[in-house]
Image (tube, rainbow, N blue to C red):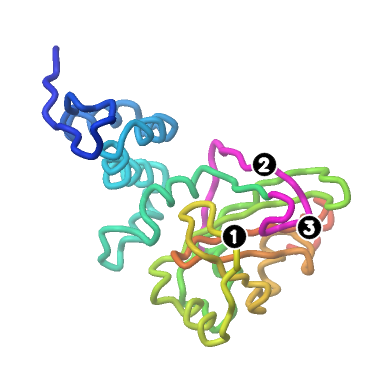
């Protein structure tokens, strides 16, 4: 069957799509058949602004809903039809470990970012990363992505997460009340928003290291203005972490 192009790109005369686009409904059905493949969505986004806008509004949203359906229902249960920082940022957070660069947020080590096949995010685990007075907030946090045998740094774990309705959260209110400073240069790798250091704000509870199986003095994480969280820790040897959890 030959499909008729129905939409015309009006963003740029130099755009490769000057002869028009397939309808949004057709593209939706194609990507539904492809099971919302994130690499193909990213490739389509690079084609032109029209496709990039479609991916942001529709395709990344469907990817998130298929990848983590219960989590997405909860994040939207406050009545919002969107999420803080947009669907593309959330889609990337679900499948991408940000790693770190020397001189960056976690400036002691160089570990490149990479895609991960599957990650479990837990609302219950998120409670461990919140001070007692903030535990009515909803925070989903991933299991640590382990990078073993990193020289003097030992076994390193990266974790990431997202707040529900961060703009109304107690964590945000406390950061503002404390006068916490945003990082002067670094931004969130998922949405490019400015970042608060939870370590500098003295808002990392002891329960976070217990949940991660990490050394208490070797954990650090940041929260961006859109409520995305990213952090690093030095993991305890397996036998030690099992004893700590007991």
Looking at the rendering, the stretch of residues picked out in magenta corresponds to 101-123
Residue at point 28%, 43% (across, down)? 53
Name the mark nearer the viewer: 1 or 3. Answer: 1
**Nearer to me, 152 or 116:** 152
Q: Which quarter of the picture shows residue 165?
A: bottom left
**Nearer to me, 176 or 127:** 176
Figure quadrant of the N terminus? top left
Residue 63 location (% of width, % of height):
36, 41
Residue at point 67%, 75% (across, down)? 200
Residue at point 14%, 13% (across, down)? 2
Looking at the image, tell me whether mark 1 or mark 3 is earlier in sequence order: 1
The outermost residue toward the right is 152
127 shown above or below 96: below
| Residue that label 2 marks | 112
Which element carries disc 2, helix, strand or loop?
A: loop
Residue 71 location (% of width, % of height):
41, 55
- Horizontally, residue 141 falls left or right of residue 150, namely left
105 shown above or below 17: below
Which element carries disc 1, helix, strand or loop?
A: strand
Name the mark nearer the viewer: 3 or 2. Answer: 2
**Nearer to me, 10 or 34:** 10
| Residue that label 3 marks | 241
Which element carries disc 3, helix, strand or loop?
A: helix
Figure quadrant of the C terminus? bottom right
Q: Which quarter of the picture shows residue 219?
A: bottom right
């Amino acid at each position: 069957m030959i499909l008729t192009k129905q939409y015309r790109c009006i963003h740029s005369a130099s755009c490769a799509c000057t002869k028009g686009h397939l309808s949004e409904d057709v593209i939706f059905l194609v990507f539904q058949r492809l099971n919302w493949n994130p690499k193909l969505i990213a490739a389509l986004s690079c084609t032109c602004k029209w496709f990039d806008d479609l991916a942001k509004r529709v395709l990344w949203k469907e990817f998130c809903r298929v990848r983590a359906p219960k989590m997405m229902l909860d994040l939207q249960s406050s009545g919002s039809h969107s999420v803080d920082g947009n669907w593309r940022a959330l889609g990337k957070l679900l499948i991408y470990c940000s790693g770190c660069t020397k001189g960056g947020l976690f400036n002691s080590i160089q570990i490149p970012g990479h895609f991960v096949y599957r990650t479990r995010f837990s609302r219950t685990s998120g409670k461990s990363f919140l001070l007692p007075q903030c535990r009515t907030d909803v925070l989903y946090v991933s299991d640590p992505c382990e990078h073993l045998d990193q020289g003097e740094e030992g076994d390193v774990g990266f974790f990431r997460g997202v707040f529900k309705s961060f703009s109304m959260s107690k964590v945000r209110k406390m950061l503002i009340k404390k006068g916490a400073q945003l990082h002067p240069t670094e931004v969130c790798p998922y949405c490019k928003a400015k970042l608060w250091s939870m370590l500098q704000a003295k808002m990392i509870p002891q329960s976070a290291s217990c949940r991660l199986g990490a050394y208490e003095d070797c954990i650090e994480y940041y929260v961006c203005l859109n409520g995305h969280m990213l952090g690093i820790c030095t993991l305890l040897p397996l036998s030690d972490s099992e004893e700590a959890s007991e």
